[in-house]
Image (spheres, helix red, strand yellow):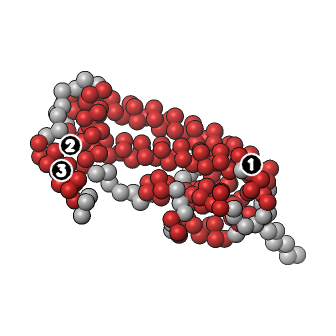
Amino acid sequence: MKKKLVKSKFDPNKTKVSLKLAIARLRLLQSKKSSINNTAKKEISTLLENGKEASARIRVEQIIKEDYNIEVLEVLELLCELLISRYGLLLQSSELDNSISEAVKSIAYAAPRYDIKELSDIHKALVYKFGIEINNVQYDNYGNEIHPKIYNFFKNETPKKTLVNKYLTEIANIYHVKWECPPEEEEKDKDEVNMSYI
């Protein structure tokens, strides 16, 4: 006996619940990652105090990436809140309304890149609702429709030396460590700034 293929449908109630659960999960992750970063900053201050600047620089790069990650999680939380507040627009037709387009496409872009079940559930629901084009958004930023913070974070670029030096200086100040950016690093910072105008 042949099994019937059942096409999945968009479930409005389940999707709304998933959005609410995603908001709670995203807030929890932000809090957890912030706490881990604060501990890491204290450890970096110890490295600076002990003259282990090279190790401190490597660790700071990771902190910068995690700070960006926290910002992206916050943006995703806000986008989920936006979809809840404009839920009527999400339900009204199979055409994507412009006022929720960035939120829908940004979530569809980010969901496969995170191991967050609630985001994955929302992503599936959005594909059921608006079609395969929404799924294809995850492969590229067509028409610059993905929120810039989300898109830029997933480029996985190495933090600039200027930013690394700013973080190290800030950490040294917070934990009262006597550390100054070496002159050669300051020169690199100047070169980096000059290159940014080319």
Q: Earlier in the sequence, mark 3 or mark 2?
A: 2
Q: CA distance from mark 2 to mark 1?
A: 47 Å
Residue 164 shown left or right of residue 83 in the figure: left
Question: Which element type, helix, strand or loop, lies under badge 1?
Answer: helix
In the image, which disc is placed on residue 182?
none
Q: Residue at image x 25%, y 47%?
A: 162
Q: Nearer the viewer, mark 1 or mark 3?
A: 3
Q: On screen, 81 above or below 28?
A: below
User: Where, quadrant-wise, is the N terminus in this rendering?
Assistant: bottom right
Is residue 146 in sight in this rendering? yes
The residue where tag 2 is placed is 54
Is residue 108 in sight in this rendering? no
The residue where tag 1 is placed is 16
Q: Amino acid at mark 1?
A: Lys
The residue where tag 3 is placed is 190
Q: Where is residue 6 drawn, in percent x and y?
A: 82, 68
Q: Where is residue 193 drawn, in percent x and y?
A: 23, 53
Q: Quadrant of residue 175?
A: top left
Question: Which element type, helix, strand or loop, lies under badge 2?
Answer: helix
Q: CA distance from mark 3 to mark 2?
A: 20 Å
Q: CA distance from mark 1 to mark 3?
A: 49 Å
Q: Earlier in the sequence, mark 2 or mark 1?
A: 1
Q: Amino acid at mark 3?
A: Lys
Q: On screen, 88 above or below 78?
A: below
Q: Nearer the viewer, mark 3 or mark 2?
A: 3
